[in-house]
Amino acid sequence: MSAPLIELEHVGVAFSAQRRVGSGKFWALEDVSLSLRQGERLGVIGRNGAGKSTLLRVLAGILRPDRGQMRRDRVSCQLLSLALGFTPYLSGRDNAILSGLMIGLRQREIIARLPAIKEFSELGDFFEQPIASYSSGMVMRLGFSVAIQAEPDVLLIDEVLAVGDAEFQEKSGAALRERMRQGHTVVLVSHDETQVSALCDRLLWVEHGRSVREGPRDEVFAAYHDELVHPEGGA
Amino acid sequence: MPQHLFELILFSTYAELRAERSRSYLGLIWWIAEPAMMMAAFWLVFDVILKTGGPGYLPFLLVGLTVWQWMKSCITHGGHAIWTNLGLIRQARLPVLVFPFVQMLADTIKFLFIFALLLVILWVIGYPPSLSYLALPIVFAVTLLFAAGVGFLVAAVVPLIPDLRFVIEQVLTVVMFLSGVVFALDSVPSPLREVIALNPVATLLDATRGILMHAQWPDWPALLKVCIISAIVFAIGIGVVRQLAPRYPKLAV
């Protein structure tokens, strides 16, 4: 088996509680360990506030662990973010380029993909208009069309699988599933268990900022459901 | 610098200038109209009403305000840039120095545009170009180095203590009056005048005015001193931003 691309050992991340002099810290992540290998599709499950999104931001290299060890190969990890860096007064085209640059694409790569982005977002002539004139659905459509262009070694996804109206949800969900099937390494955070079952082969269960269990999908799901039905030790 | 970052900085600068143009009805006209209105206000107060201007006051004021506005916008716009982009910094892994840098680049492009117009005005009112113009790029490079250094320092701290924004605005106003932007420092009594002359902004303005109005070469030793101070401020500014960078993604927007 190949060496892990990313390994976390007992990683914790602390935030200050509020912007006040001498305010305390709280640990959004207390103690999380995981290892991610090439081609794996890891789902992260757990209740609201368990620290799943914070974990993704650690993996993306946005947050630095305050304790514990993180080891990462020289791979690019990208959080799939919709409408990253969008500016209201710029046209859809300019925003697509700006956002593409922010998710790590080269300018010529984005320009080459502009026709595809325009087509996928179904914006038509609005593509040349400032996005201030768009409906929120149109902004999300453009945002998704750009975000899906990112080609990191490890794709990190935080519950944004479907945006827009029903029809576009179908289409964007399909596009994303297609990306995941192409053998990319993916970490997916979601509340939707059907989605996680369908897309991931391994699971990490996080509770109160701690990793409870990591392993094959069915095994972790079984333990998770057990806990939901027969909670042990309060929590 | 990786080419990718270079592209991001250039395109963001273009986007910034373009967005600024579209934010108002008159767009680009404000690039000129805003400084012109400010100059008119100072000219009215100091020359017409108080009569403290004296001969040559108009070009003195034009040059001083043009250069000062450039420095001030680099410091305030650059200084707010990390703070205003915290939302982005929370979501994407980008070197935070990009944000102040983009603002300063945009302000410098605007400055060059206004400066070209200033040159035309100076030529028309009787201050022709001279050989000493050759020193302008050096003086401007030092000016930018100093403003950028201060801007980075401010940018580093404002996200952690946003309250500083209100203080900085006032401090800059005081610095403007103490740097001989709107009135010559010759009128300041002696011991105070020497203290004020230590201020790098005063030296930089003197050098620029000497070149543009009196065909004078800059006072090289003084300029070198300012250059060294600026380089130190710049290095500290970048160092503090890099030191604090891990904390920005954790801040509330």
Image: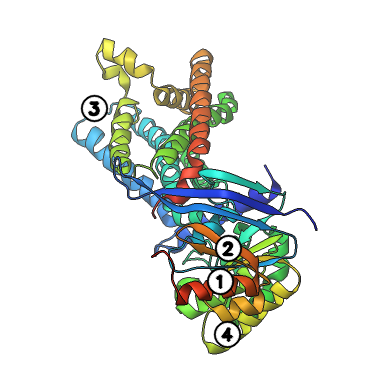
Distance of mark 2 from mark 4, alpha carbons?
Answer: 35 Å
Which tag is nearer the camera, tag 3 or tag 4?
4
Callouts 2 and 1 in the same chain? yes
- Screen quadrant of the C terminus of chain B: bottom left
- Screen quadrant of the N terminus of chain B: top right
Check disc 4 and report the residue beneath it.
Answer: A168
Q: Residue at x 33, y 19 (%)?
A: B196
Observer able to see residue B70: no
Q: Residue placed farthest to the top in the image?
A: B191
Q: Position of residue B67 (x, y in %)?
A: 43, 35
Q: How many marks?
A: 4
Of the image marks 2 and 1, the number of the one nearer the N terminus: 2
Check disc 2 and report the residue beneath it.
Answer: A213
Q: Secondary structure at mark 2?
A: strand
Q: Mark 2 belongs to which subunit?
A: A
| Residue type of the residue flagged with mark 2 | Arg
Q: Residue at x 35, y 28 (%)?
A: B56
Q: Residue placed farthest to the bottom in the image?
A: A167
Label 4 crowd (10 A; few <14 / some 14-19 / many >=20): some
Check disc 1 and report the residue beneath it.
Answer: A223
- The dot on residue A28 is none
